[in-house]
Image: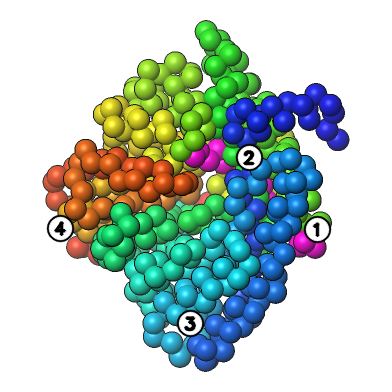
């Protein structure tokens, strides 16, 4: 039970420190929607999504009103469409993306994730068709998000898929050049992708998940930053304890909302994702947490150590508050969505190389990074290869969401507005990786994958 002090403290976090529930995400299995007719499959997909999620947005709004807790996004994740569509007679899977978009609009959710393929060990016919359709799908829909898993610790890295994704990202950018290459913001390339992630753009409903489930993603970097600002001169043990206690309180709120949504929708509760997800709002920044530990600017030497402390303390505090923690759970570092990260990148304190080092110890990876539009596809593929290698070797999820903005060069800034914020065009190493990427094949799994 919550006592009076906890309630008052939570109210203060909401009103002054940007605390919110970032998303309620309903996962829906579409495995029973497969058909040899694409038309039939799409009809079944639309009907099933609307049947399960028709009351999702209203329920979220009711919980917001009843408990006074902001719930920023209501979302849906579905079975990877490459699996569902593969039985059909379709050759262009963009038609499946359009029906997902129609269903998302019908029920009023912000995004729907699951235009996805799992190709870490190789392709099926459905995987190839889905990946080929990604640029058209993301440039012609509003709410559909896509992801491709190209590596796991058990399988190694599918370098043929890594190479292809460089070209897919470039095509996404070109097809949405009039919108700052915004289609790329809805595409994530993963290693070790989790099946229960509630956050976009990488969410999908895994094949090991139940028929329908509610997953909740909490947030609250502003709350953590405010707590640390009151610890001037404290040692790192005290900082870690403070973050743990704060993460516990944040997760308790997430657990409450998740259980309430589960009960009202009569859908099983899945997990709470503990990730600290920043927004462009002032004070809602992971970078500011790191700077509150004593760094002059995020990206300065010591940033990786500070982020490691933050990530670990968030998880330790969160797991004490909920028995069902999943998804990504830690700290996100999306550049464009974090006002502190943007400032650090513009000042030169934060580079792609430093961000890559930080991803060794945080939740995801190189996220919402804008680069020059003339960056070769092979260089983008090499950036993906580097990032997923970190995930494979360390047995963790890593990802790349990168945006080559046509017509822009290093030092420019692209404005997206809303959650996506603004993105400075970051410097890319000018030396070629083309020969390396063109080798193809599969980088074998590391020795630490042999755990049986």
Is residue 391 visible from the viewing direction of this image? Answer: no
Q: Give residue 435's mark.
A: 4
Question: Which of label 4 and label 2 is nearer to you?
Answer: 2
Distance of label 3 from label 1 (alpha carbons): 34 Å
Q: Quadrant of residue 318?
A: top right
* Image position of 206 with respect to 274: above or below: below
Residue underneath mark 2: 20
Label 3 close to label 1 by CB (< 8 Å): no
**Could you tell me which residue is drawn at 42 percent across and 51 percent down?**
399
Classed neighbour count for the residue bearing mark 2: other residues with Cα under 10 Å, few (<14), some (14–19), many (≥20): many
Q: Position of residue 355 (x, y in %)?
A: 35, 37
Label 1 close to label 2 by CB (< 8 Å): no
Q: Give residue 264's mark.
A: 1
Classed neighbour count for the residue bearing mark 1: other residues with Cα under 10 Å, few (<14), some (14–19), many (≥20): some
Q: Is residue 243 magenta?
A: no
The residue lying toward the viewer, choosing from 50 and 189, is: 50
Q: Which residues are magenta?
A: 265-279
Question: Which of label 4 and label 1 is nearer to you?
Answer: 1
Distance of label 4 from label 1 (alpha carbons): 55 Å
Q: Position of residue 245 (x, y in %)?
A: 68, 26
State left or right for residue 270 relative to residue 330: right
Q: Position of residue 19 (x, y in %)?
A: 62, 35
Distance of label 4 from label 3 (alpha carbons): 33 Å
Q: Give residue 86's mark.
A: 3
**Could you tell me which residue is drawn at 38 percent across and 48 percent down?**
416
Question: Which of label 2 and label 3 is nearer to you?
Answer: 2
Quadrant (top left/top right/bottom left/bottom right) for the N terminus: top right
């Amino acid at each position: 039970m919550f006592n009076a002090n906890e309630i008052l403290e939570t109210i203060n976090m909401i009103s002054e420190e940007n605390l919110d529930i970032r998303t309620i995400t309903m996962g829906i299995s579409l495995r029973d929607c497969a058909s040899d007719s694409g038309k039939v499959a799409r009809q079944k997909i639309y009907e099933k999504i609307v049947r399960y999620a028709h009351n999702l947005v209203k329920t979220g709004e009711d919980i917001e009103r009843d408990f006074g807790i902001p719930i920023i996004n209501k979302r849906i994740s579905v079975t990877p469409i490459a699996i569902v569509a593969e039985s059909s007679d379709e050759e262009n899977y963009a038609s499946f993306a359009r029906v997902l978009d129609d269903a998302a609009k019908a029920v009023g959710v912000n995004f729907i994730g699951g235009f996805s393929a799992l190709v870490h060990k190789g392709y099926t016919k459905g995987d190839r068709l889905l990946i080929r359709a990604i640029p058209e799908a993301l440039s012609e829909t509003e709410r559909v998000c896509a992801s491709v898993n190209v590596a796991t610790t058990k399988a190694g890295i599918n370098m043929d898929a890594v190479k292809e994704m460089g070209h897919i990202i470039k095509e996404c950018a070109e097809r949405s050049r009039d919108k700052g290459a915004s289609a790329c913001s809805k595409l994530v390339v993963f290693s070790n992708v989790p099946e229960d992630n509630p956050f976009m753009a990488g969410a999908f409903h895994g094949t090991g998940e139940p028929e329908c489930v509610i997953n909740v993603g909490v947030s609250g970097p502003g709350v953590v930053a405010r707590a640390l600002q009151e610890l001037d001169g404290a040692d790192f043990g005290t900082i870690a304890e403070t973050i743990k206690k704060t993460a516990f309180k944040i997760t308790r709120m997430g657990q409450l909302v998740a259980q309430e949504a589960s009960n009202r929708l009569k859908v099983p509760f899945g997990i709470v994702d503990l990730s600290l997800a920043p927004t462009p709002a002032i004070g809602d920044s992971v970078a500011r947490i790191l700077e509150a530990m004593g760094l002059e600017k995020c990206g300065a030497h010591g940033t990786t150590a500070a982020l490691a402390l933050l990530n670990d303390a968030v998880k330790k505090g969160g797991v004490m508050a909920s028995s069902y923690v999943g998804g990504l759970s830690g700290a996100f570092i999306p550049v464009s969505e974090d006002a502190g990260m943007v400032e650090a990148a513009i000042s030169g304190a934060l580079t792609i190389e430093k961000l890559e080092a930080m991803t060794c110890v945080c939740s995801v990876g190189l996220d919402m990074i804008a680069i020059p539009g003339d960056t070769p596809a092979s260089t983008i593929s090499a950036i993906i290869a580097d990032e997923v290698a970190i995930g494979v070797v360390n047995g963790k999820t890593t990802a790349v969401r990168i945006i080559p903005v046509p017509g822009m060069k290093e030092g420019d800034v692209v404005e997206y507005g809303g959650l996506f914020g603004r993105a400075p065009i970051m410097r890319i190493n000018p030396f070629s990786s083309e020969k390396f990427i063109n080798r193809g094949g599969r980088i074998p799994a590391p020795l630490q994958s042999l755990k049986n």
